[in-house]
Image (cartoon, grey):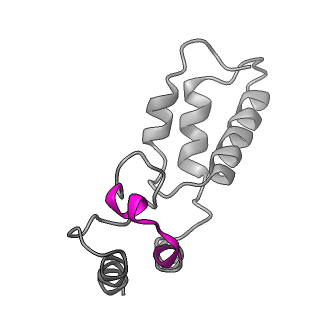
Amino acid sequence: HLASDVDLSAVGGELPPHATGADIQALVNTAQIHALHDDSTHVTATHLHAAAQETQPSLSTRDLEHYVRLYVPFLSQHDIDNLGGKSGGPPAMATGPQGDRNEEQERQRVALA
């Protein structure tokens, strides 16, 4: 059970920008262990904060950059137009000048290399 005073957006702010779903699951599991050690029936903000300090991201920045380079060739023009927005594109990619799809992808590849 999650304590009613927990602000999940604040907890999310403690995570690295490239945190994965698995990293979030690890954070929650670690927070639950902290709650058990405190004989608490609820996971509190203190438990989550402590877990965030202990949880390491499973994806390094270098790995993230590698995966982004792999991802670029599969982008549609819509994806390219919305990079960095709320479309679900990789967070490390920046929007380049608009143009032909192949030219834009090549610019992205060069920028990430």
Residue pictured at 76% horizontal, 37% vertical: 33
Is 66 located above or below residue 3 in the figure? below
**21 and 94: which one is in front?**
94
Residue 85 is inside the magenta segment: no
Q: Position of residue 79 (x, y in %)?
A: 42, 60
Asked if the magenta segment contains residue 74, the reply would be yes
Residue 48 picture location, percent across and down: 59, 34
Instruction: Give the magenta part as a residue range.
Output: 71-82
Q: Residue at x 53, y 71 (%)?
A: 60
Q: In the image shown, does 48 or 104 lie closer to the viewer?
A: 104
Where residue 109 appears, as percent x and y from the top left, is 37, 83
Residue 103 percent coordinates (x, y): 30, 82
Q: Nearer the viewer, residue 106 or 56?
A: 106
Asked where in the image residue 82 lies, by quadrant, the reply is bottom left
The answer to whether residue 32 is above or below residue 88 is above
Q: Which quadrant of the figure has residue 39?
A: top right
Q: Quadrant of the C terminus?
A: bottom left
| Left or right for 106, reference 7 | left
Q: Residue furthest front?
A: 100
For residue 87, side relative to residue 45 (left or right)? left
Q: Residue furthest top?
A: 4
Please state, as top left, top right, bottom left or bottom right, where the N terminus lies in the image. top right
Residue at (37% x, 64% y) in the render: 80
Please tell me which residue is depicted at 68% across the width and 24% down the height of the picture.
43
